[in-house]
Amino acid sequence: MEKMNIIPVILAGGAGTRLWPLSREEKPKQFHNLSGEGTLLEQTIKRLMPLDPAMCLIVSARRYEADSAEELDKTGMKGIILSEPMPRNTAAAVLYAATYLSRVYEDSIMIVLPADHYIKRNDDFASVLRIAVEQAVAGKLVTIGIKPEYPETGYGYIKALNDGASVMSVDMFVEKPNLEKAKRYILEGNYFWNSGIFAWKTSRILENFMRLMPNHYFSFDPLRKMNPGEIASNDPAPWSVKEKVFSEIESMSIDYGIMEKAENRVVIPADFGWADLGSWNSIDDILKPDANMNRSPEIDRMVFIDSRNCSVFTESSRVALVGLSNIVVVESGKDILIMDKNSSQKVRDVVAIVRQRDSKA
C-alpha cells in the first residue's frame, strides 16, 4: 500500500447550543469534560494517535483558537489551528484544510471528523479508520456509517448497496427521516447513521471541489498562492484575504456539496459506541448510572434521594434531588436549566429567548 501522511482534520467551530447552558458561544461543548475523562476535543485527538498521524489540523473559530491550542497541548500531538473568519459550514472548513495541506505535502490522507462526538471503544474506532485509510489511498471517498440501534429521526442516513461487505458502495445520502421511514430503514438493514466522519486523499477532495463546487474552489485561489504559514496566519494581511474568501462563498455542508453527488463513494459500517451528543438526553450514553439510573460526571458531589433516571451537570455546586424522576439539571455560570428528559429538543427555544433578552439588555 502506498505510504502517505495521515492528517486528522478536526472540525471544532460549532457553538453547540443544544447543550445550553454548559455549552454556549463563549465555551462550546467540545471544550467541556462531559464524561469525566477529558474534554471532547482532547479525547478526539487522543483516539487518533494509534494511526500515527504526521500532524493534526483543528479548524475552528478565531475566538476558540486559544482553547483549541490548549487541548492540543494536553495531548502532545503536533498540530496547527486554522481559524475561520466566519462560519460557512463544513464544506468551507474541509476546503480550508485541504488547501493548507496541499501547500505542505505533495498529497496526504485527510480524516475529517467533528470535535464533539463521544466514542466508547477506541480500539474498534482505530480499526475502522485503518480500513478507511486503505480505501482512501485507493482513491475512494470514504464515510463511516454507524449501525443504527433504534429508529432515530434526528440523524441523516447513508443508504448502502446491500452486498454485506465490510466496505460497501454508497447508493445515496438520505435526509433525516420521519419515524415510519426510520423504522423501515432498520428493517431493511442497509441504512446507516451518517457519523460525519470521512477519509480521502487531499488531491481527490480538491478534484471534487473543482468539479462539484467550483464557486468554493475558485474563491480559494488567493489562499493557494500563499505559503502554509500565511494560510494559517491571523496577521492583518492574510486575515483580510481570508475574510474576503469566506464572505464570497455560501454556507454549505460537505455532505450536500460533495458527498451526495460524488463518484467512488464507500461507506464502512461501524459499531464502536458512537454518540453524537446533540442533546442533554444523549449525554446519558456516556455516563455510568448508579443503581437508580442517576448520572453525573461528579456523582460523589450529588445527592439523590427517592429519585430515578436523573442526570446532573454542575461546574461547582452540590445538587440534591428528592422525589424526582426523568429530570436533567445543568448549572453553568449564572444559568440553571431544569428539564424533563423528554423535552431535550426544546433547549433551542430557551437559547433563542435568552439571546433575545440579552440583546435588549
Image (cartoon, rainbow, N blue to C red):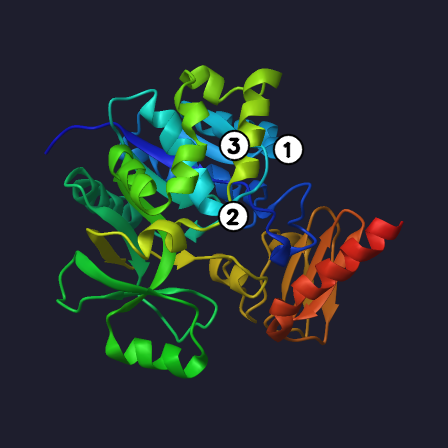
Residues under labels 1 and 3: Cα distance? 19 Å
Residue 207 spot, x, y in % from top left: 27, 38
The relative height of residue 317 versus residue 323 in the rendered view (above or below) is above
User: Is residue 238 left or right of 75 when viewed as pictured?
Assistant: right
Neighbor class of circle 1 (other Cα within 10 Å; few <14, some 14-19, many 20+) is some
Task: Name which residue type carries label 1.
Answer: Arg
Residue that numbered label 2 is attached to: 251
Q: Residue at x 59, y 51 (%)?
A: 16
Residue that numbered label 1 is attached to: 63
Closest to the camera, between mark 2 and mark 1, is: 2
Q: Nearer the viewer, residue 197 or 215?
A: 215
Q: Residue at x 68, y 58 (%)?
A: 302
Which element is circle 1 on?
A: helix
Residue 113 spot, x, y in % from top left: 40, 44
The relative height of residue 189 versus residue 160 in the rendered view (above or below) is below
Task: Name which residue type carries label 2.
Answer: Ser
Closest to the camera, between mark 1 and mark 3, is: 3
Residue 160 spot, x, y in % from top left: 23, 65
The relative height of residue 219 versus residue 19 in the rendered view (above or below) is above
Task: Name which residue type carries label 3.
Answer: Val
